[in-house]
Amino acid sequence: MKFEGTSSYIATEDLKVAVNAAITLERPIIVKGEPGTGKTMLAHEVAQSLGAEIITWHIKSTTKAQQGLYEYDAVTRLRDSQLGDEKVKDIKNYISKGKLWNAFESNKRPVLLIDEIDKADIEFPNDLLLELDKMEFFVYETGETIKAENRPIVIITSNNEKELPDAFLRRCFFHYIKFPDPDTMEEIVNVHYPEIKKDLIQEAFKIFYDIREVPGIKKKPSTSELIDWLKLLMTDDVDAKILREKDPKKLIPPLHGALLKNEQDVHLFERLAFISRRENENLE
Amino acid sequence: MFINFFFDLKQASLPVSLKEYLMLMEAMNKRVVDSFNVNDFYYLSRSALVKDERYLDKFDRVFGHSFKGLENSEGETEKEIPEEWLKLMGQKYLTDEEKKMVESLGGWDKLMETLKQRLEEQKKRHQGGSKWIGTGGTSPFGAYGYNPEGIRIGQKESRNKKAVKVWDKREFSNLDGDVELGTRNIKVALRRLRKFAREGVETELDLDNTIKSTAHKGYIDVKMMPERRNKIKVLLFFDVGGSMDAHVKICEELFSAARTEFKHMEYFYYHNCLYDAVWKDNKRRYNENIKTWDLLHKYPSDYKVIFVGDAEMSPYEITYPGGSVEFWNEESGETWLTRLLNIYENAIWLNPIPERYWDRISSASIIKQIFSDRMFPLTIEGIDQAMRELNK
């Protein structure tokens, strides 16, 4: 089993090494990086390229580790017992399986995506230490041990909102997806829009990387925003010439809403555009 | 050789453990990567040993150091001078002193010319020494050196991918914990300071309690409990004006990060040292100030106190009544600080000046002493330590 990237996802060399190490050693891999650099996508692509089933577990601030294993519905059972339901005799009827259980049960090695683990409580990763290490857990209500038949490929994403505990990190491989350089970016864009015009890409890239360099910008536009913006440019059939426009009155790029997602950033950009316009006028 | 590398990492205070090292060995054993390829080994070891992007830059440096000489034969220093370098020169901020030193070498043009010459003479990568272009040396040319008028030959800008070793590019340099402080990083560091407690409106089902109570009473008796929330309360004091002007940006960042991170946060301004009044608005500081006594009475002792200031002043401003440069203070700054520290058990001082200078600034040493050594540098690492201290 080796991950080599797919036709729809450009994986850099270091990413491939990290993913393959995690697959071979059957350990989780933690993927971090700026928002919109394809962290979640990675799991789907790994699953696709290996032909494995993907099981996703989206983490919220209220998610508990136990929910990933199983949940015991005591309230329903209590109610059923009062109604004299036959179901009540078997406790298994009230245990609902979590994502980890599903992944452990799978008869072909699946990919388990634990998405945005940092959203959960600070103790959450610690509660999963043993389960992810041994790939087994104990169900107290029925007294059975669930053990993974095929250790799933565990991919964990984090947006760095919380630091993860050292003990947890020690058991994982780690990869930080850095922001793609223009060459890689061009490959990525080509994967998404093979029919896009070369000159449009060039001009759009220039604007895009310029915006990212603007000092003081709050939310830097990322890959996914660039992809959205290019799509808009293509559907609106914006010509590359317009992007090249040096007319100071049109310094703000067309359809900038796709790139600047924050009111302050738009203001900042407008102000900078205004200043550079004034400078241009002075030059003339 | 790998063991040495591991100890090098330890020495550079990277948090690597034996478990991770064994994991790397296991990966090598299982032939995850072709062991003859240094690049792949670099990627693999990075992924196994570094678990936080803050340490990536440090890792790159240690890797470069431990495995020098192992690079591919084509690992030759570039001979062409890319235009970017020249552009970077223009951006470099020079003090008058530095400019003079440049003059002593015959000015910019001369410097650039010498550089070109040396690049042509030099055929191999070079480290240390004082003439050749390389890393860590004292020659005016090269990277990571200490010559004040040196030209940093950044390999980051290189277009020739093959010739440059990946780890030497130090692409992650600005993620190092000691270097960059963005609000996001500060927020992560501030998050150390958390204490969850259930207080307020009861919105969640308390399952355990419900079951217990139901069993007890014989009918379903639903019990609720409040949601878990961060109940840390913080008082922030910012030094403004004078010598603090140089640190405005970082203080702003800290302030904005703290404001989003702590629900219960109060901030105040002071100048140089704490005296009998503080204020909340710098425009109206003389009209609308707050008596320090009122403040000490108003906020209970479970508030955590963070002082931000360079602690750079005349020692008299701390130790003597009437020492303040701005007005006649009846009681010394030290009295006020001690008074405050007696009430708030958890208090720390964040100093934007690098730690190594503190001992040389007598006022900073005095304040550090008053705070019983709880003074931390205003860097990510520093904030991190400070928050741990506050959590005690």
Image: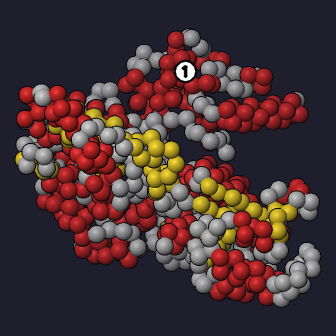
Q: Can residue A25 be seen in this view?
A: no
Label 1 secondary element: helix
Q: In which quarter of the image is residue B362?
A: bottom right
Residue B374: percent from the left, percent from the top? 59, 78
Q: In which quarter of the image is residue A50?
A: top left
Picture residue at 10% right of the left edge, 36% below the top: A92
Picture residue at 29% right of the left edge, 47% below the top: B213
In the image, residue B364 sits, relative to residue B82, either above or below, namely below
Q: Say few, some or many: other residues with alpha carbon within 10 Å of mark 1 (under 14 / 14 to 19 / 20 or more).
A: many
Q: Quadrant of the N terminus of chain B?
A: bottom left
Q: Which amino acid does label 1 sit on?
A: Leu
- Residue A177 lies left or right of residue A83; in this view the side is right
Residue B72: percent from the left, percent from the top? 32, 58
Residue B242: percent from the left, percent from the top? 83, 69
Residue B193: percent from the left, percent from the top? 51, 62
In the image, residue B267 sits, relative to residue B18, either above or below, namely above
Residue closest to the eye, B204 or A276: B204
Toward the front, the furthest residue is B217
Picture residue at 40% right of the left edge, 30% below the top: A187
- Residue A251 lies left or right of residue B150; in this view the side is right
Residue closest to the eye, B321 or A214: B321
Residue closest to the eye, B85 or B367: B367
Picture residue at 72% right of the left edge, 37% below the top: A268
- Residue A213 lies left or right of residue A46; in this view the side is right
| Residue corresponding to mark 1 | A200
Chain name for mark 1: A
